[in-house]
Image (spheres, rainbow, N blue to C red):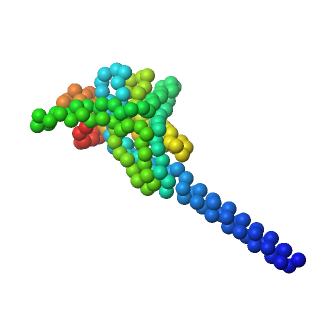
Amino acid sequence: MVLGILSIVISGISLIMSILVLIRDWWYERLRIKVSVVKWFASLANNQPFFIWMVIQNNSKLPCSIIKMEIDFVRNGEPVHATSHGSKALISTIKRNNITTDLYSLDYPLSIDGYKSIGGYIHFRSSVSHSNFEDQTVNLTIYTNRGNVTQKIRLNFGDNIMRVYQHRMGELKVTLDSNSQPIVFTMEEL
């Protein structure tokens, strides 16, 4: 009788410990992605993709593969959407010292090992002009093989490389952002 009760107590303790270990492991191995926007590039031509240079960190133990990204937000009461998936796209062609170099966006799927990161331009397409995305805080949804993550990112007017070039050439008349603060233009090149 005593042995039967003792074995039930030991089994109960083992079950509780197993559940605690399972919860702890799930917590440490859950999908945790952090995105940082460095700069972005949008040409002045219509129906062209725009490119966001971002650093994507996988802050979890297990690797993940990013298969698609989407941007959503509301501007003037209207939903605005952009999607990124598929093969890489040409951003620009740079010519220096008679050497031509093509600069491309990253290609899907983006595989990121545990506790590693990847950085580069990601291209997005939308049915509206890229100017709708300037000076906006947007929801970026990242679709992976381990689930989806949504984060807010800011697409600052002064971080758009095309606007930086316009500013340097004196062609840009906009000097204040949507919060009536002076625009700080990045000093970075493409």
Examine the rendered structure and indicate whether residue 75 appears above or below residue 68. above
Outermost right residue = 1
Q: From the top left corner, tell me how far across and down residue 154 is, in percent.
A: 41, 39
Q: Can you tell which quarter of the image residue 132 is in?
A: top left
Q: Which of 179/67 is in front?
A: 67
Q: Which of 147/173 is in front?
A: 147
Number of numbered discs present?
A: 0
Q: Can you tell which quarter of the image residue 187 is in?
A: top left
Horizontal side, residue 63 vs residue 5: left or right:
left
For the point 68% across and 67% down, the residue is: 17
The answer to whether any part of residue 57 appears in the image is no
Q: From the top left corner, tell me how far across and down residue 51 is, in percent.
A: 35, 34
Outermost left residue = 97
Horizontal side, residue 62 vs residue 122: left or right:
right
Q: From the top left corner, tell me how far across and down residue 123 is, in percent.
A: 37, 33
The quarter of the image holding the C terminus is top left
For the point 37% across and 43% down, the residue is: 54
Horizontal side, residue 161 vs residue 127: left or right:
left
Q: Which of 96/170 is in front?
A: 96
The quarter of the image holding the N terminus is bottom right
The answer to whether any part of residue 3 appears in the image is yes
Horizontal side, residue 17 vs residue 141: left or right:
right
Outermost top residue = 46
Q: From the top left corner, tell me how far across and down residue 139 is, in percent.
A: 48, 37
For the point 37% across and 21% down, the residue is: 47
